[in-house]
Amino acid sequence: MTSRKGRARRNSDCTAGGLRPALRAPHRPRPAEGAEQAFVIGVLTNAADFQRARAWGVCDAPDFERYLADTAELLADALERFETVRARMFHPQDFEEFCLLHRLDPAEPAARDRYLVNPPLQTQLLAYRGEELAGDFVSRLVRARENGLTLCHVDLLLDGGLYGGAGEADEEQARWVRAAYQRGGEVFRRMLVGAGAGVYELRLRVDAPDGKLTAAARVLQWEDGVVRINDEDLELVCAVLCAGLALELPAVAVLHGSQGSAASCGEYLPAAWAWSSGGPDWAPAARPVRLDGVAAQPGYSLGTVC
């Protein structure tokens, strides 16, 4: 399930010596003139999805393990041949609903191609840089799909303001959303600065119309303030914070984990802080909070953090 832009297409149904089943890569739109040299692939992320997708002729691998190995080989080859390699989860139910909506035959390669490059799903794409496919990257693909659905919800609530769909005419709304996004990023930064070095997880919930907006992100923060966080998780956290602040929705956040660092002789302390918001600002929660099974005490004042 791949899409290639900018270079001559390769027949991925061929294998060295023809000794093993090949991964089919039916997503191959013709590259546009001057298009960026890029490779995009949809990946089945579990055995159940693999079995369901076999009925559409998505791949020839005999089992899910062989499928992952073939896909990893395809990605390794793509890294050598294309400037950009990106992947997203191929979700059978999403694909089936997409085909039903557009009156497409799911067994046709063109249907899978359209599903892969569908613009509303671009938020689910992750850059691939050689990670082990069967390791954390598959889990990230699953989270990226969930994150992408939440991002679409946020964009809908903001009338297209998150991704510029509101149109150039409504510049005032665009500025309003940009300002809320920046405030959300600043809220998250102050939470981390106040926490100091450590390993944490942020859990965030905003009570929005048509369902709650949720986000979670694992964060590693060093003594010098350098933060490690997956790009897609950071984008989601800032977007959900943006929606809550822009629309003044009730929200709660919990930052928990182990506070400390190797520089302090490896001394780590459990920590859990909670904040809430019901308007344009965030403040320490008025009382102890339990969010997704995590108990936390009212956090520190973000206004005192530089």
Image: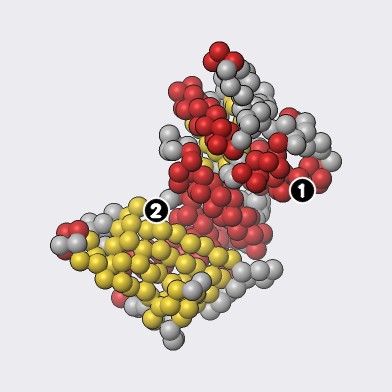
Determine if residue 11 is in view: yes
Task: Locate residue 73 relative to residue 192 in the image: left or right.
Answer: right
In this view, the residue in front, 118 or 133, is: 133
Q: Secondary structure at mark 1?
A: helix
Dot 2 alpha-carbon crowd within 10 angstroms: few under 14, some 14 to 19, many 20 or more: few
Residue nearer the viewer, 91 or 248: 91
Assign the N terminus to one quadrant of the image.
Answer: top right
Q: Residue at x 78, y 33 (%)?
A: 107
- As shown in the figure, which amino acid type bears the numbered disc 1? Glu
Q: Position of residue 262 (x, y in %)?
A: 20, 58
Q: Which mark is residue 239?
A: none
- Name above or below for residue 248 compared with residue 126: below
Give the CA distance from mark 1 to mark 2: 33 Å
Residue 144 visible in image: no
* Residue positioned most to the bottom: 287
Q: Residue at x 41, y 63 (%)?
A: 201
Residue sitting nearer the eye, 241 or 159: 241
Q: Quadrant of residue 174?
A: bottom right
Q: Which residue is mark 2?
A: 229
Q: Position of residue 72 (x, y in %)?
A: 50, 32
Judge depth for marks 1 and 2 and give the one in front.
1
Amino acid bearing label 2: Ile
> Dot 2 lies on which element?
loop
User: Can you identify the residue that label 1 sits on?
Assistant: 97
Earlier along the polypeptide chain: callout 1 or callout 2? 1
Q: Residue furthest top?
A: 17
Where's residue 252, x and y in %? 50, 75
The tally of labels here is: 2
The residue that appears at 43% across and 84% down in the rendered structure is: 288
> Could you tell whether 144 is left or right of 105 in the image?
left
Tell me the crowding category of disc 1: few under 14, some 14 to 19, or many 20 or more residues within 10 angstroms, Cα based. Answer: few
